[in-house]
Amino acid sequence: MKRIIGLLLVLGMNLAYADNSVQPGSNIAKWKEECGSCHIPYPPQLLSADNWQSLMGSLNRHFGANAELDAKDNKRILGFLERNAGSGKLYSSASRRISETPWFIREHDSISPGEWANPDVRSHSNCSACHGKTVLGD
């Protein structure tokens, strides 16, 4: 009986501390739909909440494109991004580019310029060229 109780406690603790970085529900579907219509929907933890706020507040000039959303969708997506954002300076970039965060630079410092220039890669923002669907949490 003590073993069963112990096992249940361990399982319960694992559930309590499970990774909840991606919130279920319609907000995640709206994020995938809207952001994924032009590029991969970058995982929220790759930028700070401040960066997401700035980025979502300037969608009319989103890296050279107009990506404006209606106010309701913007609020829903921003809420999802803020709740799941990275914390600290590692996930912050003055340019709001994930590829210019200290985390990204550190994680990719072993990639040679030739690998970045590969026609299958083309850009620092083409995460799925090397990471496949793992970038989307699959």
Image: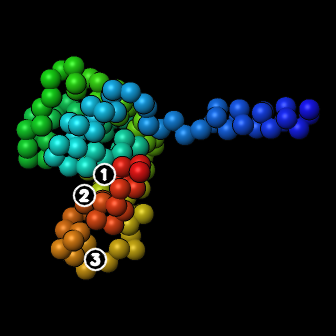
Name the residue: 44% across, 37% down: 22
Q: Which label number is shown at residue 98?
A: 1
| Position of residue 127 in the picture relative to residue 14 (left or right) | left
Q: Determine if residue 135 is in view.
A: yes
Instruction: Categorize mark 2 by other alpha carbons within 10 Å: few (<14), some (14-19), many (20+).
Output: some
Label 2 is placed on what type of residue? Answer: Ser
Discs 1, 2 touching: Cβ within 8 Å = yes
Q: Determine if residue 53 is in view.
A: no
72 w.r.t. 91: above or below: above
Label 1 is placed on what type of residue? Answer: Ile
Instruction: Give the mark nearer the N terminus: 2 vs 3.
Output: 3
Q: Position of residue 5 (x, y in %)?
A: 85, 31
Label 3 is placed on what type of residue? Answer: Glu
Name the residue: 38% across, 66% down: 108
Q: Position of residue 31 (x, y in %)?
A: 28, 35
Instruction: Give the mark nearer the N terminus: 1 vs 2.
Output: 1
116 w.r.t. 21: above or below: below
CA distance for labels 3 and 1: 18 Å
CA distance for labels 1 and 2: 8 Å
- The tally of labels here is 3
Give 112 or 69, whichever is nearer the viewer.
69
Q: Which label number is shown at residue 125?
A: 2
Quadrant of the rendered image containing residue 68: top left
Q: Give the quadrant of the N terminus.
A: top right
Instruction: Give the mark nearer the N terminus: 3 vs 1.
Output: 1
Q: Which residue is mark 3?
A: 115
| Position of residue 17 in the picture relative to residue 43 (left or right) | right
Instruction: Categorize mark 1 by other alpha carbons within 10 Å: few (<14), some (14-19), many (20+).
Output: many
Name the residue: 25% across, 60% down: 126
Give the SS element for disc 3.
helix
Give the SS element for disc 1.
helix
